[in-house]
Image (cartoon, grey):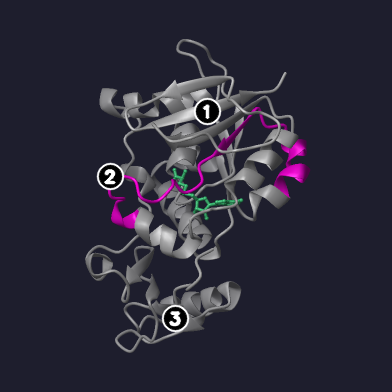
Amino acid sequence: MTLSAPRIAVCADPPHEVALQQRADELAASLGINKTRLGEPDCDLLLAVTPERLELRVLVGEPDLIGGNAVYADLNAIDTTSPAGRKLDMPLLKAVGIKKGHAYRPAVIDCTAGLGEDAWLLASHGCTVTAIERQPIIAALLHDAIRRASEQQPDTAQRITPHTANAADWLPQATSLKPQALILDPMFPTGRKAKERKPMRVLRMLAGDDDDAPALLAAALATGVHRVCVKRPLHSHVIENDTRPKPDVVYKGKAVRFDVYLNP
Ligand SMILES: C[S@@+](CC[C@H](N)C(=O)[O-])C[C@H]1O[C@@H](n2cnc3c(N)ncnc32)[C@H](O)[C@@H]1O
């Protein structure tokens, strides 16, 4: 987690809607954050409950993050069908063991769900996905995104079960779900050439840099699950661990790769 954690508060927008105020009260209580009034916020990040969705607005931070578009996930907007969209999926699908022309669809635990893009891609291809996110505000945004997506694409949304937990602690009890693949996508190392897009930078304000990724990988490998898939920047080093110095297979995309560790 970051050293200077952002101050976060929740509000209803528009403020006169009673149902939104109630939802904001519930969120403030469940997330343990303050509730504030629109227009008088005393926080860095404002979690706004609107009629359409839950969204995060940056009020204080790096200048180019302030104002502009709010951060939320729109899972319905993810391209899963066009040729370009399918190309983007490819390394992810290969990593979890999906092969062209084969019906096999694994049960996957996404150990670093974030705003749910990878979980959604996998679910849209027929995988059942348990999506674990430990940062409570990000988890709330993910839950809300799945709820909204279920209105348009109920079959895909039903295949995703979100859960708020630290996956490293939770994985030992997850074997009862009989997953065939685990996905790990901790925050990429900072200082890369390509500047991250706003949603990822805001996620980083909340989640930090995931410096404990080696412990998560160790917990994932210890489960004995058949495929442990780690998403990395294309040219980055592997995540260190004591037992498996090298992945067994690597699937490369344009900007990322998946390091896959196979267990018998
Ligand atoms: C790069 S984002 C993941 C993006 C996601 N793969 C997607 O497609 O939207 C990393 C996320 O993993 C979460 N995370 C990191 N380590 C975790 C852990 N041990 N347990 C649960 N969540 C974790 C962070 O809080 C952050 O939200």
Q: Is residue 80 left or right of residue 163?
A: left
Name the residue beneath numbered marker 3. Answer: 21
Residue 16 painted magenta? no
Q: In the image, what residue type sits under mark 3?
A: Gln
Give the image location of residue 228, x and y in percent.
Answer: 61, 30
Q: In this view, does 133 lie to the left or right of 13?
A: right
Name the residue beneath numbered marker 2. Answer: 194
Q: What stretch is highlighted in magenta?
A: 170-199
Q: In the image, what residue type sits under mark 2?
A: Ala
Q: In this view, does 51 lie above or below 160?
A: below
In this view, the mark in front (3 or 1): 1
Q: Can residue 125 be seen by looking at this rendering?
A: no
Q: Residues within 10 Å of mark 1 (few under 14, many from 20)?
A: many
Give the image location of residue 134, x and y in percent.
Answer: 59, 57
Q: Which of marks 3 and 1 is nearer the N terminus?
A: 3
Q: Are marks 3 and 2 in contact (CB under 8 Å)?
A: no
